[in-house]
Image (tube, grey):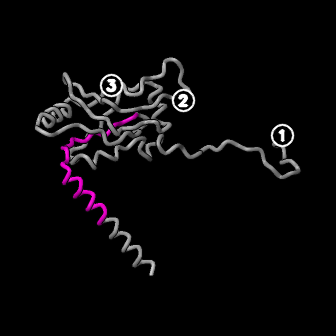
């Protein structure tokens, strides 16, 4: 058995591939692929449901690249099925002529009992389905849907006041700890 070659006289070793290289946090499920920040500002978020999404291959790759946006997206129940509308998933950078359309309607995959529960709740006045985040779980893209009720302007101002108060309180605590 021969020995591997010794390092060169400059002392540099040949680069060996790392076995446990850190994986992209979005692809590994450690971080959300997309988050709808405006949802909690415009709506009271009540129940949350996890749904799978029927996607094409280039859409999954685009989500891994971080090209998804849920700002104007909403859920719709029709004929016993759930759909995600206006969710923007940008085109895949290495795609070809068969690249996906950015804002196409996508089917949400939910259990029948969850669909029936959502159907009953959304029939009530003022309730709607809002996607709050996209993330990976076990290599599959999941969408968190929230049953939401719209806020009035005064509710939004109250939320903003509460947020500002919390921020000022944290800053005051941090200042007192520094002394």
Separation of residues labelled 3 and 2 (CA atoms): 21 Å
Q: Residues within 10 Å of mark 3 (few under 14, many from 20)?
A: some
Q: Tag on residue 121?
A: none
User: Residue reaching furthest left?
Assistant: 124
Which residue does the numbered mark 2 point to in the structure image? 93
In what quadrant of the picture does the C terminus appear?
bottom left
User: Residue reaching furthest top?
Assistant: 97
Tell me the mark number nearer the camera, choosing from 3 and 1.
3
Res. 76 image quadrant: top left
Q: Is residue 86 magenta?
A: no
In-image side of 57 versus 14 (left or right):
left
Residue at 39% x, 34% y: name it: 141
Separation of residues labelled 3 and 1 (CA atoms): 61 Å
Separation of residues labelled 1 and 2 (CA atoms): 45 Å
Residue 27, horizontal then vertical, whole percent = 48, 40
In what quadrant of the picture does the N terminus appear?
top right
Marks 3,2: beta carbons within 8 A: no
Residue 177, horizontal then vertical, whole percent = 42, 78
Q: Is residue 120 above or below residue 168?
A: above
User: Residue reaching furthest right?
Assistant: 9
Helix, strand or loop at label 2? It is loop
Q: Is residue 44 above or below residue 164?
A: above
Q: Earlier in the sequence, mark 1 or mark 2?
A: 1
Residue 30, horizontal then vertical, whole percent = 44, 47
Which residue does the numbered mark 1 point to in the structure image? 2
Q: Earlier in the sequence, mark 3 or mark 2?
A: 2
Residue 56, horizontal then vertical, whole percent = 42, 24
The magenta stretch spans which residues?
Answer: 141-165
In-image side of 124 versus 57 (left or right):
left
Q: Earlier in the sequence, mark 3 or mark 1?
A: 1
Which residue does the numbered mark 3 point to in the structure image? 105
């Amino acid at each position: 058995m021969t020995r591997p070659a010794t390092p060169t006289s400059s002392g540099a070793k040949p680069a060996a591939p790392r076995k446990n290289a850190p994986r992209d946090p979005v692809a590994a499920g450690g971080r959300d692929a997309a988050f709808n920040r405006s949802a909690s500002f415009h709506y009271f978020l009540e129940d949350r449901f996890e749904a799978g999404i029927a996607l094409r291959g280039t859409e999954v790759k685009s989500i891994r690249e971080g090209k998804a946006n849920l700002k104007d997206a909403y859920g719709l129940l029709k004929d016993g099925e759930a759909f995600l509308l206006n969710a923007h998933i940008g085109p895949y950078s290495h795609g070809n002529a068969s690249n996906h359309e950015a804002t196409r309607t996508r089917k949400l995959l939910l259990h029948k009992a969850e669909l029936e529960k959502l159907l009953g709740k959304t029939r009530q006045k003022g309730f709607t389905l809002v996607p709050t985040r996209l993330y990976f779980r076990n290599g599959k893209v999941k969408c968190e849907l929230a049953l939401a009720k719209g806020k009035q302007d005064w509710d939004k101002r109250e939320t903003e006041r509460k947020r500002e108060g919390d921020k000022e309180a944290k800053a005051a605590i941090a200042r007192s700890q520094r002394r």
